[in-house]
Amino acid sequence: MYDRDLSEEQRLMRQSCRDFVDEVVLPFIRENWQREWSMVPEDRLPPSILEEADKIGIRTLGVPEEFGGVELEPGTEIATFAMIAEEIARGDSGLADKLVQTWKVSVLLRQLAPRHLQEKWFPQLVQNPQFLMAHCLTEPRGASDRWLPYNVPEAAMQTKAVKVDGGWVINGRKQFISNGYDASLYVVYANTNTKVGMMQGTSSFLVPRDTKGFAVTRCNETLGCRFMNNGEMAFEDMFVPDDQLLVKDTALGSAGVYFRPGKIIQAAKNLGVGVRAFEATADYVQNYVQGGKILIKHQAVALRLADMATKIEAVRALLDRASKAVDDNAPEAEVLCNMAKMFSSEEIMKVAQHAVELHGGNGIMLDFGIEKVLRDAVIFLHMDATVDISKFKIVKNLFPDTAGKYAGPE
């Protein structure tokens, strides 16, 4: 999205984000590259980074203004989320994901949570810059494959919630959860009807971190996006009161307010990584001398740089179209958001590869820093659905009457 397409409010928000990235995030990343590799998750990202994000109002996007949050224009909310996610990911995709998960859960709670839960949790989120939220779907025996057209009991959540007097008892496990290691509040999905498909038998619950029977079991040590602490959790006879039930049985259908924007924002974060890769590489090839002249004067280098720029613009164009479709709730929104997510993950991966290769030997040195864009880009191939699952969903959307189920009996 070029500046000429932005409202004045969006321009100001974008500039604030760029200043935050240039003055706070990138200097931290450059000066503290070793911290990304700390095996103590709490030592990676200092509290000051989220505090600075809070000062410019980007931590509480999607939270209603009455609770002190920052509401966006309804007609362009998703496009604005994407714009800000891109800018933050240009600095660090892990930080972007830390913030994005909280934005998306805020929108989910704004749409689905009863008033008393909003009154309880939104003020806590607004008052504490370190307060994070997480959305718990993926399980050890079920992830992207669940989103194939395979709505049968066998594909249901392994995590189960059983109704008891005054509430529910939940048992199960979740893994690969963004913000899972250090969130304060979780939206947990569990099977509540074993006799039907997951679209008819999955409920969602709001679970505070200190709930008895809830345990964060590990931080996943990922290749990229390491400033967001991905986690695993277990629920053992965890009691959740009735008033913490968000949606009974049809939670996955109701979570469309989370899923579609999520794919747009994933694509935007990926785009931000690509922009960072291009900016750093463009600077390098115009200042580094090889063979008696600066790199950009070598034809092979110029060709790769042109390819990087073109891929970035192609991703941006599809992302802009998909964002508008989701904001407009257009019929093509579903297929476009999957296309944007899939296309960005594949094309930005190629951009990052060019960036590393154009840096030569420096490209693979940890302390030089450009290898980070490649590590971060590779994560997006598997975030919010794998590339292949995304392609299956695109075909199913385009050809609903003839496309295969790809899982289970026809």
Image (tube, helix red, strand yellow):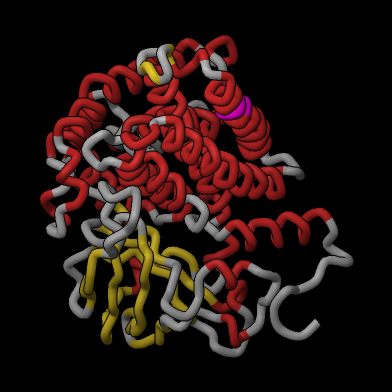
- Give coordinates of residue 288: x percent, y percent: 36, 18
Q: Position of residue 179 (x, y in %)?
A: 30, 55
Q: Position of residue 284 (x, y in %)?
A: 38, 20
Who is closer to the viewer here, 153 or 245? 153
Residue span colored magenta: 306-310
Name the side, left or right, on which 78 lies relative to 276.
Answer: right
Residue depicted at 29% across the width and 79% down the height: 235
Above or below: residue 259 compared with residue 8:
below
Residue at (34% x, 50% y) in the render: 224
On screen, residue 336 above or below 61: below
Q: Front-most of 90 and 190? A: 90
Residue drawn at the location 15% of the way across and 59% of the way down: 39
In the figure, residue 400 lies in which quadrant? bottom right
**Figure check: 250 above or below 115:** below
- The answer to whether residue 270 is above or below residue 308 is below
Look at the image and say whether residue 401 sits in the magenta stretch: no
Q: Residue furthest right?
A: 402
Q: Is residue 355 visible?
A: yes
Horizontally, residue 69 falls left or right of residue 11, namely left
Q: Magenta stretch: residue 307 in it? A: yes
Residue 86 in view: no
Tell me the quarter of the picture where residue 70 sits: top left
Quick one: 293 or 220, which is closer to the camera? 293
Residue 300 in the image: x percent, y percent?
57, 25
Magenta span: predominant SS is helix
What is the residue that sits farthest to the front in this orientation? Answer: 291
